[in-house]
Structure formats: C-alpha cells, structure tokens
Image (cartoon, grey):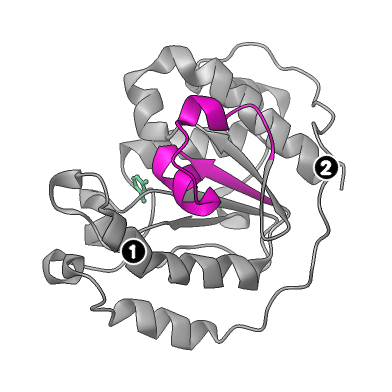
Amino acid sequence: MGNNTRQAWLEAMGITVWERRDRPAVAPGPISPPAVCDWERLMEEVESCTRCPLHAGRTRTVFGVGPRTARWLFVGEAPGAEEDKQGEPFVGRAGRLLDAMLQALGLARQEVFIANVLKCRPPGNRDPEPSEVASCLPFLRTQIAAVRPRILVALGRFAAQSLLSTEQPLGRLRGRVHEYDGVPVVVTYHPAYLLRRPADKAAAWADLKQARGIVHHE
Ligand code: URA
C-alpha cells in the first residue's frame, strides 16, 4: 500500500500521524498448531442452529469470513440488520470503519478472519443475553481453535468479556495484552462505538498498533 493510501485510511480513522510500530507489551505465548476442524460441518451446524430463541427471528446466520489460516482474528458482538440480510459480518456502517481500521494496519479484509460472538441477530440490536452467549460461544471457540491466529482482537465489551470470561469493564481490559487459550488478545473499542465517539479513535489506533506489534514480533 502506498503512503498516500495509508494516509487516507488513517484520516478516515481520524488519525493524521503515521507512527513507527511499537514493540509488543508482553512476550507472545506459545502457539500450538491449529485443531483439525470439519469446517463444512461446523458451517452446517451454525446454519441449522436452534440452540437459542434468536434462531426464530433471523434472516441468515452469520458464520464469519476469512482465510482459515489467518494471522489476525477479529471478534465482534453480533450481526446487525445488514449482516442478518447478507449473512456476512461487519458489512454495515461499523463494517466500513472496521475496513478503514484494517487498511490503516496495512491489512486487506480478505486476509483476516472476522467473526462474532453471536451468529444470529438479537432483535432491535439489543445486547446479547448471557444464555445466548453461552449457547453460541462454542462455535466461536471452535473457529479460534481451528484458525489458531497469532492475535485475537476483541471489538468491544461483549467480545472481550465473552472471550476472557470476565465481567470487567472495557476500560479495565484495554491497554494490556490478555491471553485466550495461548493466543494473545488485544481489546479495543467496537467500531459502532467509535462512530458515535470519534474522539476515541486515537486510543483504538494505539490498541491496534499494540496488536500489530505482537504479530510482527513473533
Ligand atoms: N457489529 C458487530 O459486532 N458485528 C457485526 O457483524 C456487525 C456489527
């Protein structure tokens, strides 16, 4: 990517300064090989899932997209209206900002894996219920075990709390590197939140640079 393109994406994120990448805050944990996964079967299981009441209101399930060998795995909360229609994560307004965040990192959407904690849309985009998270999380866990990314980026409170099995607020979870099953986890703001609070984009960019430092220094 040329400098001008990168600059344009950084500006879309509200960031005007290109900085050198950071060193990782912690040494990366051991990386174990990807688990053998029957992806076709997993996709069918998600598509036909009736484990929680959300299945009744969905147009489509949103399995997740990306290479099964991706180095980066981004985790969002749940499909919104557009994702429910298209069956793909982050294709609405928040998705366009996520794309800008990826571009700023020098990443194409096609080279990262993107998934949500919930595979079905909660009505009216309400917060996920704990019972829905409990029903759906095993799918995400299987995806993570199969992809075995170098970094997990949790987008927003629900993704972070679900992955890390904690009730700590986002403010306490950001700014340090966590671990999920041997994979480093960086927590940042959800793009939908950043659309409402652009002033926090600079902090999100710092989180992403921290994640990039981990990937690059492994
Ligand atoms: N918000 C999310 O958390 N996930 C999506 O897929 C879309 C919006």
| In the depicted structure, whether residue 11 falls above or below residue 211 | above
Circle 1 — which element? Answer: loop
- Residue 116: x and y in percent read 42, 56
Figure check: 147 above or below 17: below
Question: Does residue 161 show up magenta in the picture?
Answer: yes
Q: Earlier in the sequence, mark 1 or mark 2?
A: 1
> In the rendering, which numbered label is found on residue 24?
none
**Is 67 a magenta residue?**
no
Q: Looking at the picture, which amino acid does disc 2 mark?
A: His
Residue at left offset 71%, top offset 17%: 18
Residue identifier under label 1: 119
Density class for disc 1 (Cα within 10 Å; few <14, some 14-19, many ≥20) is: many
Rounded to the nearest angstrom, the CA distance separating label 1 from label 2 is 30 Å
Secondary element under disc 2, as helix, strand or loop, is helix
Q: Residue at x 79, y 26 (%)?
A: 21
Foreground pick, 3 / 42: 42
Circle 2 residue: 216
How far across and down, in percent of the image, does residue 121 sit? 23, 57
Residue 63 in picture, x, y percent from top left: 40, 68
- Is any part of residue 68 visible from this angle? no
Query: Which stretch is magenta?
Result: 151-177
Question: Hey, what amino acid is under mark 1?
Answer: Lys
